Image (cartoon, rainbow, N blue to C red):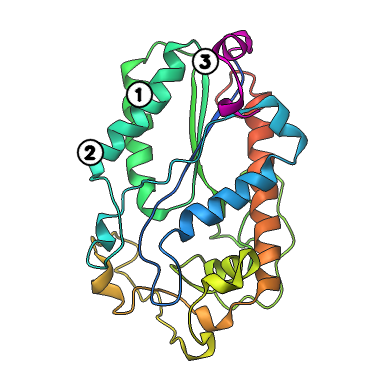
Amino acid sequence: MELTDLAWPAVAALPKTTPVVFPIAALEQHGRHMPVFTDSLLLGEVIRRVKLAPVAEKCLFAPLQWLGNSHHHLDFPGTLSASPRVYLDLLKDLAACFLAHGFTRIVFVNGHGGNITPYQQALFELKQERRDRRDLLLLALTYWDAAGNPAEALGPRDPAPAEPGFTAAPIPGLVQRRMGHACEWETSMVLRLNPKLVVGELAAVPEVPHGREFTPGYRAWVMPDRSEPGHVGTPAAATPEKGEALFAHFATGVAAYLERVVAWDGSWDS
């Protein structure tokens, strides 16, 4: 169900356990070869495909929020960003509106890595402010984590897919083992959407490795620390065929996750 299509009495009449889905993305630089709207375009397509699944009739979808936390890309012209605290409060307010209307299940579906820390803190604060509400389910999912690693079968170090026991088949031919930035995966998906949006000769775009990044610890960074052109990964390996497979993989995982939200029985082990 589309929030934008409903009058307020129709929203009021929905069961208060209806999951309210907020797609959140960004508008930021994506290297010299990709449009600044990449994250929003890709998440928008993932959500479009999720809306074709049966679970979509059981969820209420808010419009895609294109402004994200992208201050780490501000060295590159064209990037628009809300500062972390402003963005965090925006997410809190979006969710709080529907909590005030009596809804109990909120899901942020995310398409930008810089939004992850703010959305986790936003949900953490919302829950602390309502700490006695055992009926609340406050969730966020980044779409590329939804179905396991698309490049390989799950190994012992891979994150669990969004749906327990659910893993789509690995996509053959992927060079990268994880999501980068304006990388093989994202470039493939943009090629699938509209190849005219990819600028220049992809074969000439150099690889920018992820690097060791001081793992397993966390290192604070801005994009010029990592990449002069603004991308991380191997864009030259992108193809539209890989993009189609990636869209199918991610959309299937997000839809499966939303089915879990619909079926939630109030337990912690869900």
Q: Is residue 33 left or right of residue 224?
A: right
Q: Say which residue appears at 62% left-offset and 63% top-offset.
A: 193
**Label number found at residue 85:** 2
Kind of residue at badge 3: Phe
**Label number found at residue 126:** 1
Q: Say which residue appears at 40% left-offset and 62% top-offset.
A: 36
Q: Quadrant of the C terminus?
A: top right
Which badge, 3 or 1, is on the more N-terminal residue?
A: 3
Label 2, secondary structure: give it. Answer: helix
CA gap between label 2 and label 3 equals 25 Å
Q: Nearer the viewer, mark 2 or mark 1?
A: 2
Label 3, secondary structure: give it. Answer: loop
User: Looking at the image, which residue sits at the far bottom?
Assistant: 204
**Residue 197 in picture, x, y percent from top left:** 52, 70
Mark 3, Cα crowd under 10 Å, few <14 / some 14-19 / many 20+, is many
Residues in magenta, as a range:
1-16
Kind of residue at badge 2: Arg
Q: Is residue 12 magenta?
A: yes
**Residue 108 in picture, x, y percent from top left:** 48, 36
Q: Is residue 34 left or right of residue 247?
A: left
Are discs 3 and 1 less than 8 Å apart at CB? no
Q: Is residue 218 magenta?
A: no
Label 1, secondary structure: give it. Answer: helix
Q: Is residue 161 visible?
A: no
Mark 1, Cα crowd under 10 Å, few <14 / some 14-19 / many 20+, is some
Kind of residue at badge 1: Leu
**Label number found at residue 103:** 3
Mark 2, Cα crowd under 10 Å, few <14 / some 14-19 / many 20+, is few
